Amino acid sequence: MTVQPQFTQAQPVNLKKPPIVLRFSGLWPHTLRRFRFHDERRGGDLGHVDLGRTTANEILVGDENWDQVIRDEIAQMKQHNFEQHLEALQEKSRKSEARRVEEAGPVNPWRASKEGPLREGILTVNKDWFGGSGQAQWKPERIEEFRQTAMAFLLQSFPDGQLRYASLHMDEEALHIHFVVAVWAEKPSANRGHQVLLQPSENPLLRNYELAQDMAGAAFAKIGITRGGRRAAARRRGRAEDKPLPDRRRPVPPSAIGYSWARRSIISPAATAPLVCLR
């Protein structure tokens, strides 16, 4: 039996200047299928989804095989980097090291990290900016304003093919856009040759979360949506002045906050939740 989600009509906090919510989370290539499976509503936790409105969801960026394209690129760069490494060592007559590299075989084209070499993100704002809880309450002109502004921001912020996928979700309590970013960076090295790595920090918005918040605030200001709270700056000031620090927000994966963020925002000023930026 399918249980229809019940969207609340509770009144949120002051919405005269609702803040944009921009969050990032690490993503691994082997989890892309799971991400896509849930994004297409074919699995995962769908208890917060109004499946009767899923047909209104829209893919804004990305063709049918966008996730496989990323995996193919990774396989190609893995082999490319391996061959470049061997060639560089052989040219420097480092034969024993070249043998060790050859025996070890190709390695993943990214530096070790616990977050993963890709980034998933979400853009949203308090549901009442659109007109209420769920699509039936939203104003069409607000939906279009948000979509156009969000896509202009994403395409400018993640240029040259970094933005691999973006989808507009209309079947939850708060409208939001999920997206996936892949940042390739060339890393020439005398000992390794021409290496090409997935490195999110090469994009300044993924390297500096305050910059990302500033840029998002500036992009959305024209439609009456403001920047989120400057909690990081407030914590720095508090440390410098030996004052109590604002509570740290618990990072929440973008894939999990389309509905949960909207619920929190009706009971507290959590609409100012900060960007979670992983490097």
Image (cartoon, helix red, strand yellow):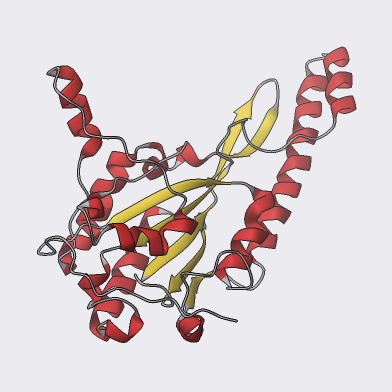
Pinpoint residue 66: horizontal percent, then vertical percent.
Answer: 63, 65
Q: Is residue 30 above or below residue 250?
A: below
Q: Residue at x 31, y 35 (%)?
A: 248
Q: Quadrant of residue 81?
A: top right
Q: Residue at x 64, y 57 (%)?
A: 32
Asked if residue 92 is positioned above or below residue 31 in the image, the reply reads above
Residue depicted at 43% across the width and 43% down the height = 203
Q: Is 265 rendered above or below residue 175?
A: above
Q: Is residue 178 visible?
A: yes
| Nearest to the observer: residue 186 or residue 210 | 210
Q: Nearer the viewer, residue 169 or 144?
A: 169
Left-right relation of 176 to 78:
left
Residue 238, quarter of the rendered image: top left
Residue 159 seen from this side: no
Image position, residue 78 (x, y; %): 74, 41
Q: Position of residue 159 (x, y in %)?
A: 44, 55
Q: Is residue 224 left or right of residue 150?
A: left
- Total labels: the figure holds 0
23 left or right, relative to 200? left
